[in-house]
């Protein structure tokens, strides 16, 4: 008959505890430090199939590591973007035309702040005038309605 869940769980727990109690061979830090590091190949001789793990060690200088990674990623296998990846295209060539940039609010505040101070003042004055015109029209309509309402005979509720 199959072993039930709790007995199996208990057995595996005890096996794991017994394995954990066994001493593990530990390398001394001195032994690890005493081992000579494998000589690194020349960066010029590296290819896509070369082993780059030696360049990723903490004792390797950053400049050498960067040179090795630059050599790796200059290979066409890694350098050509995947055409099926939606954001892998090169979008640096397309520039917004100045007319469109001038209409963007964020561009106005960040790029054209000093150049567009006067137009901003003119625009604010124009907005104030347009608001005054709208308010005047609304007042005229309200007055016209009140005059029309005063002239109409009122129905009396019975």
Image (cartoon, grey):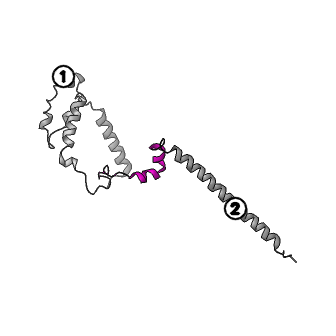
Which residue is at 59% across, 52% downward?
Answer: 126
Instruction: Please state the extent of the stretch shown in magenta in the rendering.
Output: 82-111
The relative height of residue 48 versus residue 82 in the rendered view (above or below) is above
Give the main secondary structure of the magenta stretch. loop
- Residue 29 position within the rendered picture, expressed as x and y whole percent measured from the top left: 24, 24
Which residue is at 30% across, 35% downward?
Answer: 20
Which residue is at 65% across, 58% downward?
Answer: 133
Nearer to the camera, 47 or 157:
157
- Residue 81 position within the rendered picture, expressed as x and y whole percent measured from the top left: 25, 51
Total of numbered circles in the picture?
2
> From the viewer's perspective, is 56 left or right of 113?
left
Would residue 103 be counted in the magenta stretch? Answer: yes
- Disc nearer the start of the sequence (1/2): 1
Marks 1/2 in contact by CB < 8 Å: the verdict is: no
Nearer to the camera, 104 or 72:
104
| Residue identifier under label 2 | 138
The relative height of residue 15 versus residue 87 in the rendered view (above or below) is above
Q: Which of pointers 1 and 2 indicates the residue nearer the eye?
A: 2
Q: Quadrant of the N terminus?
A: bottom left
The span from disc 1 to disc 2 (Cα, nearest Å) is 91 Å
Q: Quadrant of the C terminus?
A: bottom right
Would residue 90 be counted in the magenta stretch? Answer: yes
Q: Residue 30 is drawn in which quadrant?
A: top left
Element under disc 1: helix
- Residue 99 position within the rendered picture, expressed as x and y whole percent measured from the top left: 42, 53
Which residue is at 28% across, 36% downward?
Answer: 19
Specify the label residue 34 is tagged with.
Answer: 1
- Residue 15 position within the rendered picture, expressed as x and y whole percent measured from the top left: 30, 40
């Amino acid at each position: 008959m199959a072993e039930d869940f709790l007995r199996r769980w208990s057995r595996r727990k005890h096996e794991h505890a017994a394995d954990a109690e066994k001493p593990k061979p530990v390398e001394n830090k001195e032994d690890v430090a005493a081992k000579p590091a494998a000589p690194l190949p020349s960066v010029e001789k590296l290819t896509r199939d070369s082993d780059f793990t030696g360049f990723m060690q903490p004792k390797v200088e950053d400049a050498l590591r960067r040179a090795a990674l630059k050599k790796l990623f200059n290979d066409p296998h890694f350098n050509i973007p995947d055409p099926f990846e939606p954001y892998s295209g090169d979008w640096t060539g397309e520039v917004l035309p100045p007319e469109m940039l001038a209409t963007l609010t964020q561009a106005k505040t960040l790029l054209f702040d000093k150049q567009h101070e006067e137009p901003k003042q003119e625009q604010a004055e124009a907005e104030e005038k347009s608001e005054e015109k709208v308010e005047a029209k609304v007042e005229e309509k309200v007055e016209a309605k009140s005059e029309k309402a005063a002239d109409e005979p009122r129905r009396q509720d019975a």
